[in-house]
Image (cartoon, rainbow, N blue to C red):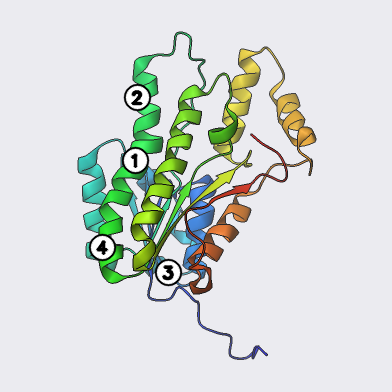
Amino acid sequence: MTDKNNPPPPFLRGRVAMVTGGASGIGLAVALALAEAGARVVIGSRHASRRSGLSERFPNREAILVLDVDLGTTDQVESFYRASVETFGAIDILVNAAGIFPEHPLSGHPDTLWDEVLEVNLNGVYRTCKRCLPEMIRRQWGRIINIASTAASVGAVTYPAYCASKAGVVALTRCMALEGAAHGVTCNAISPGWVETDAARRAIAQTARTEGRDPVACLNEIKQTNPQQRMIQPAEIANLALFLCQEGSKGITMQDLTVAAGSLW
């Protein structure tokens, strides 16, 4: 039985976690959950330092490092990684939650927009994993969690770049899982459906305006067509990420885990 007067110590105490896209939405929820479990957390995001009050949301401000990083450039990822290690030590947990999803059908798709989506959503994951995985293998322990999407396996006519990038993330995750399997390193993807974040609401509103529809009506339609008649909450993704970081979850690797309340994207 658990002694209520002497609860067990946070199970991630002594671990260092890096979370890209950790200044908002899914990434922030994951970062908060990891910090509450005792990890020292490095948050990387575009313009993260401009988000006032971000550090104050965490239980121990001294165990949080907030850095600006553009995942589309190798030099910035390298600087981000080095600053993280110099501050807290080797990275034990990597969560790639950064992502963008501008809307445009393939017909007439601007090449620059296509390149930008793949640079952030896929190449950014490649860059951070390439930097963290070898040290995890050397230290014989690591957890890599990549936030993908059900869009990777379903497709959406106005989001070809996003769907392609997330399909790439799932495939890359499986390759890395095999590379780390014999060395105590697990690598999994979490594929949410629609998650109730500011970014998702903006995307839905943009689609509604494009189609000449009411944004609130579009949002409600997404909820009503879901079997649970709702959108996923960021904390639900964080709960799964936290579970994957447990020592007892070391047999779970190379998986694409869907959190979509019974629906596809």
The residue that mark 1 highlights is 124
In the image, what residue occupies the spot 54% across and 54% down? Answer: 29
Pick the quarter of the image with the N terminus. Answer: bottom right
Alpha-carbon distance for marks 1 and 3?
23 Å
Instruction: Provide the secondary structure element on which disc 2 rests.
Output: helix
Say few, some or many: other residues with alpha carbon within 10 Å of mark 3 (under 14 / 14 to 19 / 20 or more). many
Q: Where is residue 189 in the image (x, y as percent from the top left)?
A: 49, 49
Residue 16 visible, this angle: yes
Mark 2 and mark 4 in contact? Answer it, CB < 8 Å: no
Q: In this view, does 76 lie to the left or right of 213?
A: left
Q: Residue furthest top?
A: 108
Alpha-carbon distance for marks 3 and 4?
18 Å
Q: Nearer the viewer, mark 2 or mark 4?
A: 4
* Kind of residue sitting beneath label 4: Glu
The residue that mark 4 highlights is 135
Q: Measured along the vertical axis of the image, is residue 245 above or below residue 123?
A: below
In the image, what residue occupies the spot 47% across and 42% down? Answer: 170
The residue that mark 2 highlights is 115
Q: Which badge, 3 or 2, comes first in the chain's sequence?
A: 3
Mark 1 and mark 3 in contact? Answer it, CB < 8 Å: no
